[in-house]
Image (spheres, rainbow, N blue to C red):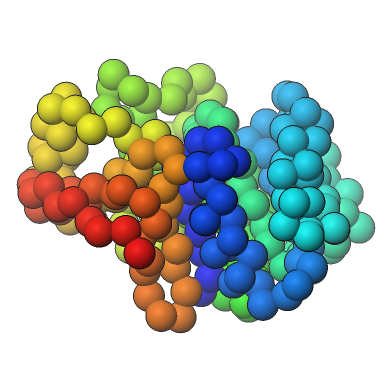
Amino acid sequence: MRLVLYSGGTPKENRDLDRELLRLTKHKHPSITFIPASSYNADIEFRDFVLHYRRFHVSKFLLLPVDRPLDRTMLELAFKSDIIHLGGGNTFYFLNALRKSGLLPRIQRFVMQGGVLAGESAGGIIITPSIYMAGHPPFDADENYVHLKNLKSLGLVPFEFFPHYKKSLRYEKAFISYTRKHKRPLFACPDGSGILMDDNGLKMLGSITCFCQGKKITLTSW
């Protein structure tokens, strides 16, 4: 599998992650489908997305909002892309829209068949087994205004992911307590950092903290 989980941040902060993402495609001019978390302001997000990746010689882009009716031709083109990029936003709304659209199993197949999947913030959380972390800790949580109960997501990695992490005792206490009760390790990533997964295993990019079995482990980048 070839995956990249972004925390978020500025284009400059994510430059190394972007290079790694494009390297995974093994193409000089890869194609990218951008799936936003919501169709609201998606055109603006997509414009900025295109302007950013054109700097890396990407020339083929497709926008696929999943909370609108999906066109069959657009779907076929989307899943022929080299990269599918899941955007950031409200994680509960995004997962709900993906599930209703029926695209979760198609995205899983895309990855299993060699496609590269990237996810930023909410999109990164959706790559994990569950979006439970989108609602935790309570002082830094997405609002579940769609009242989503089934939090099961793509399940492409055996860990949990927390974006926009800020090093503080408040977060540490919350994540140490959480991982005492839950088996999966939790990777907490500040903006500008992320996780890459390919045939060689996991690669940490940036300053990432792992919480596992009630312990905190600071990981070395690269």
- Find the residue positioned furthest to the right: 73
Q: Is residue 161 left or right of residue 145?
A: left
Q: Position of residue 212 (x, y in %)?
A: 15, 53
Looking at the image, which is closer to me, 175 or 131?
A: 175
- Find the residue positioned furthest to the bottom: 199
The residue at the point 84 percent across, 63 percent down is 76
* Residue 67 showing in the rendered view: no
The residue at the point 77 percent across, 28 percent down is 44
Q: How many marks?
A: 0
Q: Is residue 100 left or right of residue 176?
A: right
Q: Position of residue 127 (x, y in %)?
A: 48, 54
Looking at the image, which is closer to me, 15 or 47?
A: 15
Rendered view: 159 above or below 111: above
The residue at the point 42 percent across, 52 percent down is 194
* Residue 22 showing in the rendered view: yes
Rendered view: 189 above or below 155: above
Q: In which quadrant of the rendered image does the C terminus lie? A: bottom left
Looking at the image, which is closer to me, 10 or 76?
A: 10
Rendered view: 135 above or below 217: above
The residue at the point 67 percent across, 57 percent down is 84
Q: Quadrant of residue 28?
A: bottom right
Q: Position of residue 201 (x, y in %)?
A: 38, 75
Q: Position of residue 119 (x, y in %)?
A: 55, 50
Q: Is residue 186 left or right of residue 4?
A: left
